[in-house]
Image (tube, rainbow, N blue to C red):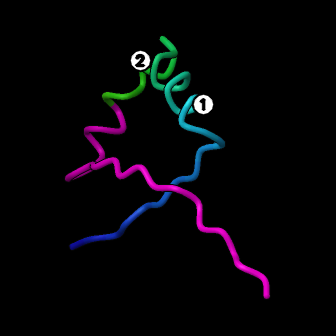
Amino acid sequence: MGPVLLVHYPSREAFIRMVADPAHREITSLRSRALDEAGLQPTTPWTRRVG
């Protein structure tokens, strides 16, 4: 396994807006060609319990 990149987006809605943007879609092929593999794993934020 090679390097791993973690990316945080402000919300799922922000991510959806980004990938739907025509300007983003124009450059998606560049990112895809630069990677051996890509996968999306949605997660939920951790919350810290106090007390």
| Relative depth, front residue between 29 and 49 | 49
Q: Which image quarter: residue 30?
A: top left
Q: Which residues are magenta?
A: 30-51
Q: Which of disc 2 and disc 1 is earlier in sequence?
A: 1
- Quarter of the C terminus within the rendering: bottom right
Verify whether residue 42 appears in magenta: yes
In the rendered image, the vertical position of residue 30 relative to residue 43, given as above or below: above
In the rendered image, the vertical position of residue 50 relative to residue 12, given as above or below: below
- The image position of residue 7, as x and y in percent, is 52, 53
In the rendered image, the vertical position of residue 27 relative to residue 4, given as above or below: above
Verify whether residue 40 appears in magenta: yes
Distance, label 1 to label 2, CA atoms, is 18 Å
**Element on which disc 2 rests:** helix
- Crowd tier of the residue under label 2, counting other residues whose Cα lies within 10 Å: few below 14, some 14–19, many 20 or above: few
Left or right of 5 on screen, residue 11: right
Left or right of 21 on screen, residue 2: left
Residue at image mark 1: 14
| Relative depth, front residue between 23 and 17 | 17
| Relative depth, front residue between 24 and 45 | 45
- Quarter of the N terminus within the rendering: bottom left
| Relative depth, front residue between 35 and 13 | 13
Residue at image mark 2: 26
Q: Which residue occupies 46% across, 17% down?
A: 20
- The image position of residue 34, as x and y in percent, is 30, 45
Amino acid bearing label 1: Ala
Q: Which image quarter: residue 26?
A: top left
**Element on which disc 1 rests:** helix
Amino acid bearing label 2: Glu
Q: Which residue occupies 28% across, 38% down?
A: 32
